[in-house]
Image (cartoon, rainbow, N blue to C red):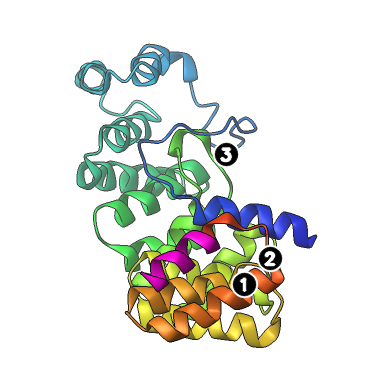
Amino acid sequence: MSLLRVIFIFVLVTGGFSYSAGQAATPSAPDKSSAAAVQSSNFEKSRRLMDQGKYDEAIAQLQGLSAKDPARKGLARELGTAYYKKGDYMKAVDLLKKATGEDPGDNEATQLLGLSYYLSGHPAEAIPLLDKVQTWFSRANVDASYVLGICYIQTKNYPQAREAFARMFDVPVDSAASYLFTARMLFRQEFDPIAEEHAQKAVALDPKLPLAHYLLGELYLYKSRIPEAIAEFEKELAINPGHAATYYKLADAYT
């Protein structure tokens, strides 16, 4: 990956880059998982309702189908997806577990199950599922590599978190950029001491990596270690004199 691309991606990260289940998704390739083609016409109405944000209506329609034909193939998957989109993640977990039991090769259901575990506060349960399936599925509305990295942070498995973010940003796992991206994510999750360690490692590997000193400066400013923050911001400006945010942070440090 070129340095310019690394900088561009990191600017996205520092500019509030985050994912949540409610965000709009980037269009993706058609779902090729084994369950995607299962009688899709049977669920056309419920999917249309979900696309319109009418989750309760979609759930009611699917429950009506269930009352008529409880063994209908793909029904647990569709209901689980509807509950996921509604934000009722524990109900989604129950149904998506059933769906993956019916079809272990259903990658989208596996990923949605992992995301449902994460969003219901169970990162340890999410990890093996998200690690198994790291393809983008549009109905998930989230980048699973990002969520996998956050799960590893929350379970304090920092090397695996770094590996997930390296994969996400397409950089070598032991590179300065990988440590820097992970440091930013750690800082966002309020793992400040570990974030500092990773940022320092990034600087040690590449003292001229853009935005590495900036992140260290942010960390030190947050901890009220003002002289260290000023020193890091000044180092950043020596490398990256056009970075406006560094000037603002440096001014904050002086005031």
Residue under pointer 1: 236
Residue lying at 31% horizontally and 38% vertically, measured from the top left: 84
Helix or strand or loop: what does disc 2 sit on? loop
What residue type is disc 1 on? Glu
- Dots 1, 2 in contact, CB < 8 A: yes
In the rendered image, residue 254 lying in the magenta stretch gets the answer: yes
**Label 1, residues with CA under 10 Å away: few <14, some 14-19, many ≥20:** many
Residue 223 is at least partly visible in this image: yes
What residue type is disc 2 on? Asn
Residue under pointer 2: 240
**Label 2, residues with CA under 10 Å away: few <14, some 14-19, many ≥20:** some
Q: Which x, y percent locates residue 111?
A: 45, 49
Q: Please tell me whether residue 116 is drawn above or below residue 250 in the rendered image.
A: above
Q: Residue 69's image quarter? A: top left
Residue 152 is at least partly visible in this image: no
Residue 33 — which label? 3
Q: Quadrant of the N terminus?
A: bottom right
